[in-house]
Image (cartoon, rainbow, N blue to C red):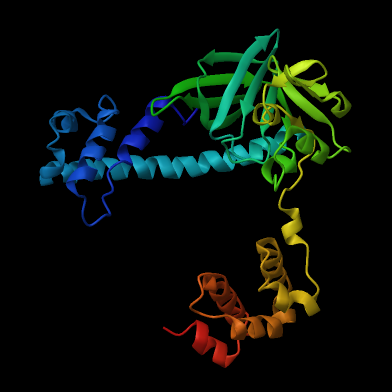
Amino acid sequence: MFFLTRELQEEFNAASIYPFEEEEVDAEFKEILYEQLAEYIDIVPHTFRQEIIERILFQNNALMAEFEKWSNGIIAHFTTNGNAVYEMREAIVECFHPSAQHVFQQSLHDGKILNAEQQGNEFTLLLDMSGGFTVESIVQLVFHSAQTEGELEGYYIYDELVKNEEGFALRVLSSFGSRFAEWTIFFKDVMANCLYRPSVYIERGTIATWSEYAAALNKDDKYYIVNNSRFMGIDLASLSQTDRGIFADGVLLGDTYEEARERIYCATYEDPYAHLSEPIPADELLFAMFDSDQNMRVRAFNTIFARGEEVAYIANAALRKADVNEEENMYFCIIANHFNQLGCLEYDMKLKWLSD
């Protein structure tokens, strides 16, 4: 039913350890590779096990040729089928409840498993995505008409979706390290609830105290804490700091500002870098590209790229003014290459920025 298994994923990991395409692997790196292969000693074929244990595999050219052939075969098999699994996953996600579609269209890789529990026919999985690859910070998945088998532990690493006559099945490999736990959930539908970090959490600027942080929160949004693995709404007006700590609706958030800010999430995603995409008027653009304020310079570069040929004359003027020996000249090199591709880079600027 599933392509993805714990054993196959570990085979792929073992097959991917040795960098066959590198011209030379020094002695120190070889020791690291042997240590990594030793973690998968019961996964690699018996042919190579003793040599890995004795750390003599890499000196045996004939055996290494066999090991490379095995590795390439595993990688090719996994990659080909992995691509098919990904395409099938994308099609299946379209059948989900709208709230879950966006979540599964992203990667849940490296989500920390905070809670996983069955209540009647519903199963709830709570993930902390702060170390992952989504704008969501907390993801709650609620599976309906759910049955599970296997174990979850540590971090959500890989998954595979399958559609069947009864509904759907999700295979998840989770891990605290290199070895994996395998878990499967069969369900008819799934819904998602998400929380985000306030923009001020990411871009604090000069904010250094709890009172400043609380004042900077967007009063038009809704705020939550995760309490006993549940989303608990809080009233910003209830935020208070005493000698006993920082509280929200009577719940202790932490003893310090740093502890308290880690507890608060909001309902709406706020792009903390949205201000960097605010366009700069053309008559201010050249000066902005050399502004002492880095944020202003970033806005200027973003504006230059967004407007393209329309502001080519400003790009050329900036390139003419910029010093190729300055530390930040790589930004101007990027601009030079971009406008050269657009066919708008003047000849003398090609000589200045693009010639070897």
Question: 4 and 13: which one is in front?
Answer: 13
Seen at 76% across and 37% down, the residue is 213
Q: In the picture, residue 305 is in which quadrant?
A: bottom right
Front-most of 287 and 267? 287
Q: Position of residue 155 (x, y in %)?
A: 52, 27
| x then y, percent, for residue 94 | 70, 38
The answer to whether any part of residue 184 appears in the image is: yes
Q: Residue 74 appears in which quarter of the rendering? A: top left
- In the image, 95 versus 129, the foreground residue is 129
Decide if residue 164 is in sight here: no
Q: Tell me if 211 is positioned left or right of 16 in this view.
A: right
How far across and how far down the image is residue 7, in percent?
38, 26
Vertically, is 47 above or below 343? above
For residue 146, side relative to residue 249 (left or right): left
> In the image, what residue occupies the spot 84% across and 40% down?
218
Q: Is residue 258 left or right of residue 183?
A: right
Q: Residue furthest top?
A: 120
**Residue located 55% across and 77% down the image:** 337
Percent from the top left, x then y, of residue 156? 53, 28
Number of numbered callouts drawn? 0
Q: Is residue 212 above or below residue 149?
A: below
Q: Find the residue positioned furthest to the bottom.
A: 347
Q: Quadrant of residue 331?
A: bottom right
Q: Is residue 77 above or below residue 327?
A: above
Q: Left or right: 156 with respect to 274?
A: left
- Which is nearer the eye, 148 or 244? 244
Q: Quadrant of the C terminus?
A: bottom left
